Amino acid sequence: MNRLVTPELLDTDSGTPEEIAASVSDLRRINRWFGGIATSQSMVQSVSRRSGLRSLSLLEVAAGAGDLPLTLRERLRVRGIHLEVTLLDRLHSHLHLRTNAAQAVAGDALALPFADASFDLVSCCLFAHHLGHEELVRFVSEALRVCRIAVLINDLVRHPLHLVLVYAGFPLYRGRLTRHDAPASVHAAYTPREMLEILRRTNAAEVDLTRHYLFRMALVISKSKP
């Protein structure tokens, strides 16, 4: 199954406000039910164990309203890990926060508007597959510059069976945009082997890739050897 990139409607702000809201709601449920939050949680807990740190700052890139990192923060709190969250998205209009739940910044993921080593972790969920090879190298290089410990990538695995499952899930989707974007995301996703090949072109000290529930992969890209 070759990689095929098709613009996703939610990314291009296509659709009415109601359609966009329905698609965002679908994405929130997909992350809760099908391993998105659990995958990110496993990466942060791994970093916490390896570093010995129980308090970590995290920049979430392409964060939208921040549902995933804010839910992650609550789950980690009961495990004794404090996560200080900052959200970044390309437009202020995407950062619809619940009260003042986190700091939020509009900016370019490929030219992060932060000084070197500003955060312990730089994370993204379902963002990497939107990037071409060169863009992915540039993003990870920027994220490594801005982090102190590691870059965390939570994304899909491209696989024919994954595509079958996405189509089988159509009755669960509330939004028209999701019925277009969900299969488009699988087509655009990388395989684990492709991701590792691309990341060899960065200055990462170490890349730890694990497979997770329902065709998710988690990459902990260390800035220096643990």
Image (spheres, rainbow, N blue to C red):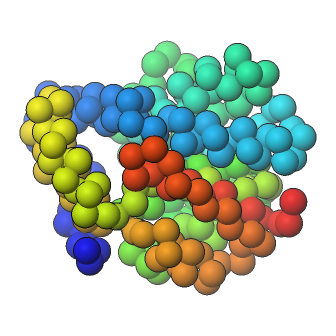
Q: Is residue 65 visible?
A: no
Q: Give the residue at x 65% y 45%.
A: 43
Within the image, what quadrant is residue 41 found in? top right
**Is 162 above or below relative to 99?**
below
**Is 131 above or below relative to 134?**
above
Q: Give the residue at x 15% y 47%.
A: 167
Q: With 130 as the anchor, is 226 left or right in this view?
A: right
User: If the image is split into quadrants, where does the C terminus sit?
Assistant: bottom right
Within the image, what quadrant is residue 219 found in? bottom right
Q: With 214 as the anchor, is 55 left or right in this view?
A: right
Q: With 198 as the anchor, is 93 left or right in this view?
A: left
Q: Give the residue at x 39% y 46%.
A: 214
Using the image as rendered, state which of residue 45 and residue 201 is in the foreground: 45
* Residue 77 on image: x %, y %: 70, 20
In this view, the residue farthest toward the right is 52
* Residue 87 on image: x %, y %: 54, 39
User: If the image is split into quadrants, where does the N terminus sit?
Assistant: bottom left
Q: Give the residue at x 83% y 66%.
A: 224
* Residue 81 on image: x %, y %: 77, 27
Using the image as rendered, state which of residue 13 and residue 68 is in the foreground: 68
* Residue 98 on image: x %, y %: 46, 19
